[in-house]
Image: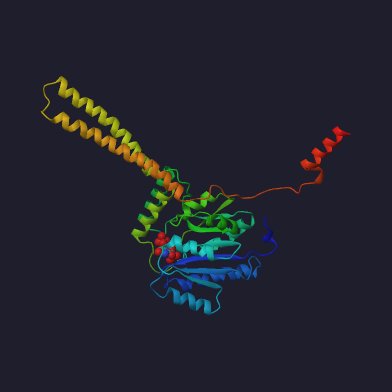
Amino acid sequence: MRSSDHAAVNLSIVIPCFNEELVLPRTAERIAGVLEDLCLRGRIRRSSRIFLVDDGSGDSTWRIIEQLTDDGWPIVGIKLSRNRGHQHALLAGLHQADGDAVISMDADLQHDPAAIEPMLDEYLNGHDVVLGIRKSRTAESWFKRTSGTLYYRMLKGMGVDIVPEHADYRLLSRRAIAALRQFGETELFLRGIIPQLGFPTAKIHYQQAERAAGESKYSLAKMLGLAIQGVTSFSAAPLRFITLLGVLVSIASLGFSAYALWIRLLTDTALPGWASTVVPMYFLGGIQLLCLGIIGEYLSKIYIETKRRPAYIIEKVHAGEPRPSRTPSRRHRAAREAVAG
Ligand code: UDP
Ligand code: MG
């Protein structure tokens, strides 16, 4: 149990918003209502805030945010200088939020606000990371559902540690955010980084709703970008694949070369110039792929090192209060005195 059991928690909610003028007032009202209720029941502190991050919207999103804050809503508005994409907007919010626990969610109410309190419970039970898991995705299109499921499977297959059906609805404790700051990379795929943090983690299941208003802000291009980000940020498997291909083609080309030589030397069906053309072709093809693969291996090392990820994250340090009689110097001194005496 955390000490915040006694003193209520300062909770922050981070919501990235990109052209969300149609849904934002509704979302703000709904989330503020949840916070007010938790506050009245003494579960969170009055200082709890909603951090709305305007990710360079072209519509009236920022004006709405300013209006809401001016009207006295528990909101802090953060405006990014330009559209940087959902993951960056989210990170900006996480860095600005001052809560003991910070929950990130989408602006369109697809992430059920009813899950906020269970997440808080898990935080108070000692979890630093609480992941929101979609129970079903019936509210989404067939394309989004199927491509999503296949993508998660592919990432798993490449050895990326990723939690299925978890988007960016999650609670992070202050120290989990501090650990996240140690990840130096600017190109982010938070869903992949969070499992790397370790720390006690819990899951909360929620029903994914339909977008409350407006259109999806994740265009196909943005979705593809995020998908590629997920693979290239966490796996050198595609590079390794080139090496494997190189080895296979090299072996095959040796076989073909032997076959071409056999035709040329031991049969009389060979066309003039055929063997001298195809043998080097196969051979060079294989060698080239193999070399590319070797370069890929080194590239993957550089790629991993340039990320400058923390080598480790310390969760706790435990040390007792040393008693004077147990300190080595005293013991040694006592032993020396005993021998001398
Ligand atoms: N979003 C953002 N920047 C972008 C695209 C999206 O901040 O460039 C936000 C958007 O406002 C929403 C969240 O990311 O709060 C998820 O976007 P959306 O709901 O449109 O994605 P979908 O649910 O369709 O995948
Ligand atoms: Mg959505």
**In this rendering, does residue 176 appear at all?**
yes
Q: What residue occupies the far right of the structure in this picture?
A: 341
Vertical placement of 259 versus 55: above or below?
A: above
Residue at the image point whose x is 61% and y is 70% from the top:
47
Whole-percent x, y for residue 123 in the image: 61, 57
- Name the quadrant containing residue 244: top left
Q: Which of 95 and 170 is in front in this view?
A: 95
Vertical placement of 85 versus 135: above or below?
A: below
* Coloring basis for residues: rainbow
> Is 88 on the left-hand or right-hand side of 324?
left
Whole-percent x, y for residue 62 in the image: 45, 74
Q: In which quarter of the image is the N terminus?
A: bottom right
Whole-percent x, y for residue 296 in the image: 36, 42
Residue at the image point whose x is 42% and y is 42% from the top:
157
Whole-percent x, y for residue 148 in the image: 40, 52
> Is 3 on the left-hand or right-hand side of 70?
right
Residue at the image point whose x is 54% and y is 62% from the top:
103
